[in-house]
Image (spheres, coloured by chain):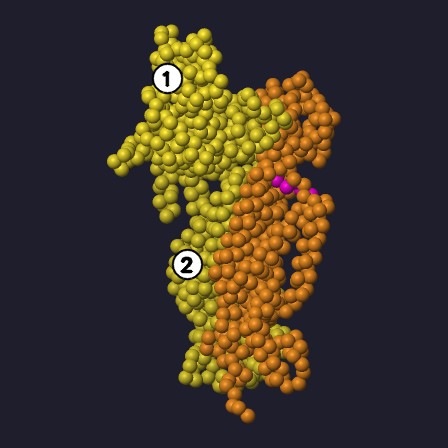
Amino acid sequence: MAVGFAQWGNDLYAGRKSYNIVGRRKIWYGIAIAFVLISGVLLVRPGLNPGIEFRGGSEFVVSGVADRNQQLAIDTVQAIEPTELPRVTTVGKDSLRVQTAELTNVQVEAVRGALASTFGVPTTQVTSTFIGPTWGADVSRKAVTGLIVFLVLVSVVMTAYFRNWRMAVAALAALFHDIMFTAGVYAAVGWEVTPATVIGFLTILGYSIYDTVVVFDKVRENTEGVLDQSLYTYAEKANLAVNQTLVRSINTSVVALLPVASILFIGAFVLGAGTLRDIALALFVGMLIGTFSSIFLATPLEVTLREREPAIQQHTQRILAARAAAAGAGDVADVVVAGPRVSPLRPGAHQGFAAQPKRRR
Amino acid sequence: MIAALAAILFAGHQWSDAALTPNLALDLEGGTQIILTPVPVAGGEITSTTINQAISVIRNRVDASGVAEAEITSQGTGASAKIVVSLPGNPSEETLNLVRTSAQMEFRPVLVTGTGAPAATASPSPTPTATANEGPAAPSSPSDKSYYVTAAVQKQFDALDCTKAANRTGGVNGDPKTAFVTCDKDGAYKYILGPVEVEGKHISSASSGLQQLSNGTVGTLWVVHLNLDSTGTSEFAATSARLFKETEPLNRFAIVLDGLVISAPKINNVIPNGQAEISGSFTRESAATLAGQLNFGALPVSFQVESEQQISATLGSEQLQKGLLAGLIGLILVVIYSFAQYRLLGTLTVASLVLAAVITYLTITLLSWTQGYRLSLPGVAGIIVAIGITADSFIVYFERIRDELRDGRPLGAAVEHGWARARRTIVASDTVNFLAAVVLYVLAVGGVRGFAFTLGLTTLIDLAVVFFFTHPMMEIISRWRFFNEGHTLSGLDPRRLGAPTTRYVGRGRVATAARPTGPLDRDAPAADQPAPGRPVPVGAGTATVGAGTATGGTIAERRAAARRTPAPRAAAPTDSTSTTAGPDDAPTEGNEH
């Protein structure tokens, strides 16, 4: 397999094998828009399911217990409310603290009674109260402020580095798509959103931009001086860059996803609900879609934006016209579809007769 | 660098209280739960708004003290609301003070002062008697002693015993509109203070430092500097102008913090610029704590500690163990994958990852000792994820080297060129990551800060490892024969990478990469192969490309041959590299059949 993969990588690099990713961009845009729309619907209904850290909930304190078995408390609560994921903590020497989502008065009484009988204490030793969110609105607001500042700064840095604002716009669009998609998956699965999930989302944010920058750097490298040559159009050069980084993208995402997948597997199937599962799902989906969007969304979008530049536009038309002329008959569209085989310039390699200066007839 | 980090850590462990493992956060280790009950004040009502403000202030203070994550929430509703603060581990007294003290500061003029003991004897100032007056209808100024020091106040003052510690617990500031009787915080003096002249909310910033003496040198006394906002500045200027003309003790103003006088300096000048300095018996820590408390403002209400209890970890130790196990499994899979992809070059990846892991561990342990950093489960997950981002740097680097090899460069040059190109990519992408970390760290609070810290740390370590370990190592091993000659198992085999065996070097000459064949491919089943090292025809073309036959035909002829046969090239997976088709691909072909 490794040899086959290496061979595939070689062919992709040399342009012998090429996936027309940039050319078929309308398809990818369609898929991405569909993803975002479906996620948008999922976010409204059923919607995200925020945990007690965000909403607050009910808290029970069982005091004077001899047996501080946390699992027993979890089982007791779940016997009454099967969908609850209570957080149990021991407090001091002989107390248990059980936190659940907000319950109705009837449920609160039921849980109190159950806890009292399970732990063998009178009902009066089980107190219940309402607790506020640990992740309150002010925490969210500050996180959002940080996020906006980050996005603005990243746009500035990318614009400065690539000397072009279009790359930043494309990267942010891809990022938006990634976050929407991941949030949509989260809403569809219906797991509780905890602070761990939010941190997972933030990681995706970083990863998505990071991955896009790596791909864009190759695009930048390939399209350097694209206007000074007359063999390939900007889109073709960018497509070659994407093909050339395909092996790297696959390798990176496999290496990044292997640990996440193992956390997700252990978190979801061995441990059940918890921090690990929450963070791993967000990461798994987000990194997968982040790699996808860098290749299939960010780069084509960047090409679309760049092709609106007059210089690039003229250059593309000139090349297509030259090709049409070279092909003799046939209209431009045919040539565009067929296209030449795009391969990197190899130092010292012969570029073929077409590249030689021609005598004027 | 590792040695240095390890040495520092070990030294800290030997001679100080550094642990050899990082401290764990609330979710993994448990900690202390403090329940704060608001103290009702006259006229002040406890609403959910005040509780939320208090939570926000406490959170800011705790965050500013380090990177430990605290959990702060409200309990109950309405007038019976309480605040529950959970701090990881065994928080120090300073940290607890951050949470417990409300830091309500106000400036009041001093009306009467005396020694701390109860005054059975005559008080140092004339005692207005109850019959003296009921006071004028309105005070002439906040320093109007005859209005504010009523008999009741004087009686309270006389009875107050500041030498008893119980009377110096502080707590609530008095009614801002009337006189206030209190002790200073050491119990040496007691005061009757006038109404509030400058409120603590007009403090725009506070900082701690050593006292600047009038001759410009730095003294040895720790002080807290205050900057007042515009309202505070004008109020303070007016106060100082009035007090300046008074006589002792009326020319003093008291800085009251949580019901105790921490300093009562004499006004020697009119202070128009809104800058004040509090000196007192501060240590470096207590000055910094007070400045921190003042910076984030006072709590809107005072709180008293209802209970302080140990709590267990919110996540079982099982979660951490399983998480680490998952990370280990993931790492092993990564190792297997990188060997499959990069053969022996994978060793370099693994070595770099291990190095990064060791540095991360040492740094986190060091920081948890010096900075109070604590590792939470999301932090652990973040580090496991960092494996991917760190490994990506190597993958980008190796892929660039391979690209250069495919262009026909010899390994040495390929490493050099590949590094120059990969370096740009790695630096650019890591900059973005680091930017994310810094911005989130500075602007966000709570758990997000802890995450941002971990992200920034791993990004920096990634850069350090790539620059100071992976690249130098790559340069070294690229000189080894094993890699330089492109052994099949080296992962840098130019033939597998489809490097052209010939290339034009100018003046009509063609360079032929003299690649050893046969001897290196020990594992090639020689029997069922065409003679190893023999050129193999490319497609239907007449010209052959390969070692030893490069002189057979001009470039143009070979090009022409290549152009005539596009179809076979596309179809056959081993097209122009078919020169290498013999020995190299043999093992795989054998497998495939």
Segment colored magenta: A188-194
Front residue of A135 and A207: A135
State the CA–CA distance, disc 2 to disc 1.
72 Å
Q: Which residue is mark 2?
A: B471
* Dot 2 or dot 1, earlier in sequence: 1
In percent of the image, x 51 and y 27: which residue is there? Answer: B32
Pointers 2 and 1 in contact (C-beta within 8 Å): no
Give the percent coordinates (x, y) of residue B182: 43, 18
SS at badge 2: helix
Q: Which residue is mark 1?
A: B113
Q: Is residue A350 left or right of residue B242?
A: right
Residue B300 in view in this figure: yes
Q: Nearer the viewer, mark 2 or mark 1?
A: 1
Chain A: its colour in the image is orange
In percent of the image, x 64 and y 38: which residue is there? Answer: A51
Vertical order, B458 against A336 (above or below): above
Chain B: its colour in the image is yellow
Q: Tell me the subunit letter for badge 1.
A: B
Vertical order, B13 against A33 (above or below): above
Q: Quadrant of the C terminus of chain B?
A: bottom right
Q: Residues within 10 Å of mark 2 (few under 14, many from 20)?
A: some
SS at badge 1: strand
